[in-house]
Amino acid sequence: MTPLDVQSWLDRYVAAWQSYEPDAIRSLFTEDATYAFHPWDEPLRGANAIADRWLGDQDPPGSWEASYRPAIVDGKKAIATGKTSYSNGRVYWNMWELDFDDQGRCSRFVEWFMRQPS
């Protein structure tokens, strides 16, 4: 993976989040991917479970903006950082641990985030 490959994946991630299109979500992840919302959480397992969770807990359209960039890329592993801002004033700063397969799909996703004080 190159920084451009990771940026492309991040852009597709945000687009899938905006659209909540099940196939777009599933296409980001391997069939056996793990996805943890916090590093201590038991992760979701599998692209279908990840898509089902996203679809079951949707943010209203137009209620947020997000921007993410690769901070570190080392082979098939990457760290991405960014920010999500909600229209209600909530702002979250994020770091994501990402592992990829040979086709550029994420096989492991771990989210670390902090809510910006008001």
Image: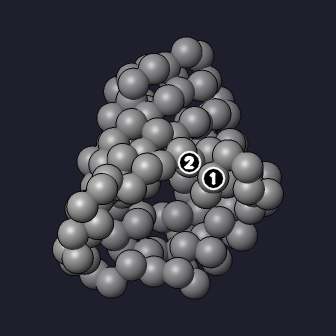
Q: Amino acid at mark 2?
A: Glu
- Please tell me which of labels 1 and 2 falls first in the chain: 1
Q: Residue furthest front?
A: 118
Percent position of residue 21, x then y: 45, 75
Inspect this view and state whether residue 109 appears: no
Q: Marks 2 and 1: in contact by CB < 8 Å?
A: yes
Q: Is residue 83 above or below residue 24?
A: above
User: Quick check: 37 left or right of 93?
Assistant: right
Percent position of residue 96, x then y: 51, 40
Give the quarter of the figure containing the C terminus.
Answer: bottom left
Disc 1/disc 2 C-alpha distance (Å): 5 Å
Name the residue tied to disc 1: 38
* Residue drawn at x 41%, y 64% as measured from the top left: 16
Percent position of residue 65, x then y: 23, 62
User: Quick check: 1 left or right of 5?
Assistant: right
SS of the residue under disc 2: strand
* Residue drawn at x 45%, y 20% as measured from the top left: 72
Name the residue tied to disc 2: 111
* Residue drawn at x 56%, y 48% as measured from the top left: 111
Q: Amino acid at mark 1?
A: His
